[in-house]
Amino acid sequence: MTETTGNRSAIWPCFRYEDPRAAIRFIVEVLGFTEAAVYGEGDRVDHAELRWPGGGGVMLGSVKDGDPPGERPGVGSVYVVTSEPDAVFERVVRAGARVTRPMREEDYGSRGFTCGDPEGVQWSFGTYAGAE
């Protein structure tokens, strides 16, 4: 059985942050996502949805008592397909973000890089869109 949602991604990585408002600013202003929804008051974010222009996105929120161990801040990684990894890389470098894997050409035909956000989540951007 195949699940589809039209032209939108049915897979949305989810992350927890100690400072979710700062994470949203980084993900939007530096990485290039757009803010679709943010619910919560003050520094607390109950739920945020940030969309990638090419489809899909990520959800995030504040750390909460009782969160499962895998949802602690700074844990996780996500791969984002882009036809313009150099433009994303330039924004990341300009912002002073930590590049954890430099821009490079992969032997499987992708061009991309990885950076860490302020709380340690790893964000990889590349041209590889999956096997055909």
Image (cartoon, rainbow, N blue to C red):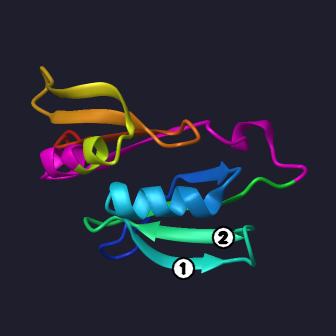
Magenta residues span 65-90
Residue under pointer 1: 37
Three-letter amino acid code at disc 1?
A: Ala
Visible in this render: residue 103?
yes
From this view, report whether residue 59 is shown above or below residue 72: below
Three-letter amino acid code at disc 2?
A: His
Which quarter of the image is occupied by the N terminus? bottom left
Residue under pointer 2: 47
Contact, mark 1 vs mark 2 (Cβ under 8 Å):
yes
Task: Identify the disc placed on residue 126.
Answer: none
Q: Residue 19: x, y in percent?
A: 66, 55
- The question of residue 31 being in magenta is answered with no
Separation of marks 1 and 2 at Cα, in angstroms: 8 Å
Residue 89, image quadrant: top left
Mark 1 Cα-neighbour bin, 10 Å: few <14, some 14–19, many ≥20: few
Which secondary structure, mark 1? strand
Q: Residue furthest right?
A: 66
Visible in this render: residue 1?
no
Tell me what residue is drawn at x 72 percent, y 68 percent.
Answer: 43
Tell me what residue is drawn at x 59 percent, y 41 percent.
Answer: 119
